[in-house]
Image (cartoon, grey):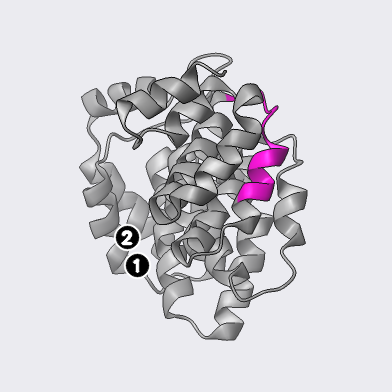
Amino acid sequence: MQSDRLLSEFKKLADPVRAKNLARFFKTGPGEYGEHDQFYGITVPEIRRAASQFHQLSLADIAKLLQSPVHEVRFAALVILVWQFEHGDEAVKQSIYDFYLRHTDQINNWDLVDTSTPKIIGAFLFDQKDRRVLYQLVKSNSLWERRIAVLATFYFIDHEQFDDSLKLAELLLSDKHDLIHKAVGWMLREIGKRSESTLKDFLDQHVTHMPRTMLRYAIEKFPDDERQRYLLKV
């Protein structure tokens, strides 16, 4: 199978020292968000170069790669999936969108979500009036499904649509996880790059009950005196 060839390529690229560093970086210790994740120690450019040789993998092969306990293998599967989505017709896009939502259990670290969700879920839903799936995902017990809901809206923000990002941000103001605080703050900051007034309207309404990390991410590009003014309100 083509997927087996990709796995063979990755084993040749493995770097045990880098693998140990990545395991620490992605919080794989007991009780941490990346617990049980394994690493070969392959850089992102190396992953992308290897994946570029396997753009024609079937969804069955991609599903097999997503089942791997090795982080870089799942990353490669998603890189391939994004390429197929971007180069596919409407029927292909629909099938990949459906496939993605069936496999959220395997899209289970922040970089896996961030590299794929805007380009698949966000891009697919951009022209759709019905975006209820995002409001279902944002209520999930899964940290990664909640992050998928947030990151999908990056595509909307890039096309000057802010409403869903702001609504989801409101729903996540009381979320307990730092990775959600960071994701929401990041999306708010991206809105602010395009419409500072929209971001400030949101902050003025919610700043007193925003998680501090979320706020810090949102106001990162503000002048220092303005950042301090908002931080003093938390």
Q: Position of residue 87 (x, y in %)?
A: 42, 79
Where residue 54 is drawn, which disc sits there?
A: 1
* Residue position marked by numbered label 2 in the rendering: 51
Examine the rendered structure and indicate whether residue 148 appears above or below residue 176.
Answer: below
Give the class, few, some or many, for how many residues have Cα within 10 Å of label 1's Cα (few <14, many ≥20). some
In the rendered image, which quarter contains the N terminus?
Answer: bottom left
Above or below, comparing residue 178 to residue 144 in the picture: above
Q: Give x and y (percent) for residue 137.
A: 72, 48
Position of residue 211 in the picture relative to residue 13 (left or right): right
The amino acid at mark 1 is Phe
Residues in magenta, as a range: 166-177
19 or 110: which is nearer to us?
A: 110
Q: Name which residue lies at 47% across and 56% down.
A: 116
CA distance for labels 2 and 1:
5 Å
Kindly identify the residue that appears in the image at 52 percent across and 86 percent down.
Answer: 89
Does the segment drawn in magenta span residue 172? Answer: yes
Towards the viewer: 54 or 190: 190
Q: Is residue 147 something that shows in the picture?
A: yes
Q: Position of residue 16 (x, y in %)?
A: 25, 27
Does residue 232 show up magenta in the picture?
Answer: no
- Residue depicted at x 53% and y 23%: 35
Q: What type is the residue that disc 2 sits on?
A: Ala
Secondary structure category for the residue under label 2: helix
